[in-house]
Image (cartoon, coloured by chain):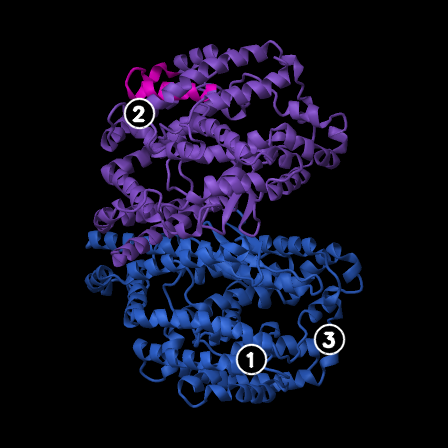
Chain colours: A purple, B blue
Amino acid sequence: MQSDKWQQLKSRLAEVQNIHYASGLLGWDQQTYMPPRGARVRAEQLATLDKLAHQFFTADEIGQLLDDLSVEAANLPYDSDAAGLIRVTKRDYDKLRRVPPALVEEISWTSALGLEAWTKARADSNFGEFKPLLEKIVELEIELANHLGYADRIYDALLDQYEPGMKTAEIQAIFEDLRRELIALVQQIGRKADRVDNACLFREFDEQKQWDFGVEVIKRYGFDFEAGRQDKSVHPFTAGFGLGDTRITTRVDRRFLPCALFGTLHECGHALYDMGYRPELEGTPLAGGASLGVHESQSRMWENVVGRGRGFWRHFFPRLQQVFPEQLGDQDADSYYRAVNKVQPSLIRVEADEVTYNLHIMLRFELENELVERKLRVGDVPAAWNAKMKEYLGVMPPNDADGCLQDIHWSLASLGYFSTYSLGNLLSVQLFDKAMKDVPAIPSQIEQGEFTGLLRWLRENVHQHGRKFTLKELATRVTGEPLQARPYVAYLKKKYGDIYGL
Amino acid sequence: MQSDKWQQLKSRLAEVQNIHYASGLLGWDQQTYMPPRGARVRAEQLATLDKLAHQFFTADEIGQLLDDLSVEAANLPYDSDAAGLIRVTKRDYDKLRRVPPALVEEISWTSALGLEAWTKARADSNFGEFKPLLEKIVELEIELANHLGYADRIYDALLDQYEPGMKTAEIQAIFEDLRRELIALVQQIGRKADRVDNACLFREFDEQKQWDFGVEVIKRYGFDFEAGRQDKSVHPFTAGFGLGDTRITTRVDRRFLPCALFGTLHECGHALYDMGYRPELEGTPLAGGASLGVHESQSRMWENVVGRGRGFWRHFFPRLQQVFPEQLGDQDADSYYRAVNKVQPSLIRVEADEVTYNLHIMLRFELENELVERKLRVGDVPAAWNAKMKEYLGVMPPNDADGCLQDIHWSLASLGYFSTYSLGNLLSVQLFDKAMKDVPAIPSQIEQGEFTGLLRWLRENVHQHGRKFTLKELATRVTGEPLQARPYVAYLKKKYGDIYGL
């Protein structure tokens, strides 16, 4: 054992990790407690920390240590901490080293301008104002992809930043199955739309009581308030600064009950994942979640598969009714369960239900591919967007703000990101099915407001590994099958077939 | 102009400043919102940031740039930003470079152990448990002083860390005058102790109302909640992360009204100072307050000279009575003013009134001097402490916890710190007298709850300069006189002569 070099590598990586954590806390504060006039100096502080983290991580010495230790690591079991450390760190390192710092900086500046232009264009609902910036961003993303490198599709390079090891062609194949099934299901449900009434969700609900109910539920989920907290922010998010400090945020809408609760459950899912890696991984690139897709599988599982499940509401509805006796006095567990699962093709992705959500993602995935393959010109995005909305969801955006300008991602130069949301949805069900097979008591536990069976299974099978395995590796290791659409489709057909009497 | 080198220096210093600010935010969070189990990882994050800031600031390149630019700076006016930048940065740089990193680390570890030992010893009220650590700390502080260097007294080296340019002999001379006057005044007041009744302060006061009243007052003081905020913490403090983000904390005692309000006013005084340097100084070592003593002059001015003044309560008492009609119905502005100014020799420094406070400081200043000059053995500290308490204040600690174990400073290896509290008290009055001379309307403005006259004077004469001048320089520049005890003594004699009818 070249124990000296391992120590050197770990201590350098721990330094980088600590800078990332510090930057993370500054970012959390920016969205929760920072006074408005602190924005300018905060941006500079973040720029300094991010520059240092990048500089320290991409140092030649780290590359040398990784090379030296790779030989030794090659003889260790694939799933050992040491082999994982070298494998994942080298993957990150090579990726960052391949991109010229000048390009990183240009992307960063352009996305700052892009965010500004997008914000204004969206307010004006005028894609034309955003078009020049998006053209620039697409060009930069193509350049970035060329630096990162790819064997098959240019989109692979961008996707790999968010979902390591995943290929465009694989996603296309999965989406192919999914699209057909979803469009059919949406149409079937459309014909029975009036079987679910969710008017009860739009009454007036005291904000503090909503907050408290959410906290009550996530404590049952296993969120440890000694090692985390929840605050308010405009856009809910999860941020972790090491084991012992994982924070979530939520927002509360007085006139739409699902907003706060499901937001809280979603972020709690992310947080439980972040709270669950083995302490031995702390301070290394293995600390954290495997990828955006795996992260989303956790948030969506706790939000939807569990939190929008019939068993969940059997247990929690009586309690919620106690909290809001006037507003929910005319409901029962079953009608409320149906209400929170109403399917409605709509224009806005973030408001979409479980059935239609993935169609929004496919649309974006397809347009992004065409953009970086230069098959679609930026100027034609609005028309292409609207055509797909009509085809997939049967609705037509009346303007750009509710159409191709609705998401922040492109303005931030984050092409390649969207599909991870769908991968997460698919994986959430594939994992949950396996959990139920391994621990058949899970459904009845959930009906009793008891979640330790599920959480323990996730800790053991997913959380503890941190970033050691990719989504694809995890799916196969844990469920014995590659990631696929079938379980998710079966889940939807059963759940919504029952709700809508299909 | 070697403008390239100026740019290089500034950009390196800005980087260091940003790391300090980040570290500051992590420290703020640690005392306000951090979940308990986050403590361990937070300590490591702080250690990384502090190490980097130290490493970057003491880099050879910075020394070289300072040397190169010193020549040019020597030809610039003393009070120019550029000359100040080189002077102050070089002072900081030389100081940090003189101390071997191994010693810094040993002091840091010993103080961590010291804090632990002190906490336990204090809980057990047993000085013996803390003695071995304090012996070690005194030895390390002597070693530190020898590295820092001094011409006259070894204590000078330690003092200079907190109060640049101030000498032990100067403080001794000032304290000499002050001690005699204070002891006499305390005795005079003691004979008329029953002339002030402060029982009304110990009633029950709703915490939120106390909080809101404090916020109302500091908004009038000029605290900008767009560029700062107030939170709760166990020990009140002020933390600034650049212009635009200055935060204070306070604590609220349901059964002691002055705790929250005067704590808030005190921290607000620090914050107004931190909010007031010229924007041009941002990102350099000139951003911030001149020294601990000057900082304390600001906090004590707004807390005591203004906030415990008769004019202040003429304006604010009717409002406070409105907030607490039942608890304060039997008081008027004058009786309340007297209540918050009750003088009472007591054992605990942080609870001491304006008259007795500085006697607590002198005691510590004298013992610290004797310790580092090896005239007092650590084992004899309790006896020496108690003897001085008896001599100066006429009270005798019944145990070590209420005696020589009461303060945290020694456990943190902060010898040399205490006297800055008294220097701040003295300077607060010396500055306030000059402000009234320059702007005679200040007292009548205060009686109308109007503080812009005073704040504007402070901005102009003190705040805008940041760290450019030392306390001694500021005192002379602003008031035309060196720092001295006379104005403070006159202030006390007038105020308390009136209150106690001496």
Query: Is disc 1 surrounded by few (<14), some (14 to 19) or many (20+) residues within 10 Å?
Result: many
- Disc 3 marks a residue whose amino acid type is Val
**Figure quadrant of the N terminus of chain B:** bottom left
The residue under label 1 is: B360
**Figure quadrant of the C terminus of chain B:** bottom right
The residue under label 2 is: A155
Distance, label 3 to label 2, CA atoms, is 80 Å
Question: In front: mark 3 or mark 1?
Answer: 1
- Residue B467 in which image quadrant: bottom left
> Mark 3 belongs to which subunit?
B
- Of residue A298 and residue A433, the one placed in the foreground of this image is A433
Q: Is residue A32 left or right of residue A177?
A: right
Magenta-drawn stretch contains A366: yes
Residue at (28% x, 19% y) in the render: A373
Picture layout, residue A413 above or below residue B264: above
Q: Secondary structure at mark 1?
A: helix
Q: Is residue A421 left or right of residue B120?
A: left
Residue A290, percent from left and from top: 40, 38
Residue at (65% x, 23% y) in the render: A339
- Of residue A144 and residue B397, the one placed in the foreground of this image is A144
Q: Which range of residues does the magenta coloring cover? A: A359-381
Question: In front: mark 1 or mark 2?
Answer: 2
Q: Which mark is residue B171?
A: none
Q: Is residue B430 left or right of residue A221?
A: left
Distance, label 3 to label 1, CA atoms, is 22 Å
